[in-house]
Amino acid sequence: MFYVYVLQCKSDNYRFYIGYTSDLKQRFASHNAGENKATQGHQWQLVYYEAYSIECAAIKRERRLKHHGNTKQALMKRIKEMLGLPSSKFPER
């Protein structure tokens, strides 16, 4: 299985990170251990993930979320509503 996931920073509720991996548990642990430059220095919680049986599908979805504003905006709105955060208070980073 391959996963596209969204992490939320524990110290800044409006900071999120999007990624993909084949081992979600290990990747999540590496983010919190500071082994990823983009997320080091913060503790993270997993707030969303999607599972794919084909790696190229997960890569395509991750790229779409990172580089297509409307796609990312729609997902982030859903996630913020699920978390009880105002969806338009702060822009996504």
Image (cartoon, rainbow, N blue to C red):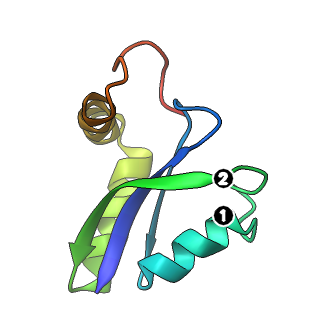
Q: In which quadrant is the C terminus drawn?
A: top right
Q: Report which quarter residue 24 is drawn in.
A: bottom left
Residue 22 rendering spot, x and y as whole percentages: 41, 84
For image coordinates 75% across by 57% down, the residue present is 40
For image coordinates 61% across by 32% down, the residue present is 12
Tags 1 and 2 touching, CB below 8 Å: yes
Name the mark on residue 32: 1
Residue 67 rendering spot, x and y as whole percentages: 42, 47
Q: Report which quarter residue 54 is drawn in.
A: bottom left
Total residue callouts: 2
- The answer to whether residue 74 is above or below residue 5 is above
Of mark 1 and mark 2, the one earlier in the sequence is 1
Residue 50 rendering spot, x and y as whole percentages: 25, 65
- The answer to whether residue 13 is above or below residue 39 is above
Residue 86 rendering spot, x and y as whole percentages: 35, 17
Q: Secondary structure at mark 2?
A: loop
Name the mark on residue 21: none
- The answer to whether residue 15 is above or below residue 49 is above
For image coordinates 65% across by 36% down, the residue present is 11
- The answer to whether residue 13 is above or below residue 42 is above
Q: Amino acid at mark 1?
A: Asn
Q: Secondary structure at mark 1?
A: helix
Q: Is residue 78 left or right of residue 32?
A: left
For image coordinates 39% across by 61% down, the residue present is 5
Name the mark on residue 43: 2
Instruction: Classify mark 2: residues with Cα within 10 Å, few (<14), some (14-19) or many (20+).
Output: some
Q: Amino acid at mark 2?
A: Gln
Q: In which quadrant is the N terminus drawn?
A: bottom left
| Residue sitting at the far top | 89
In-front residue for pair 14/43: 43
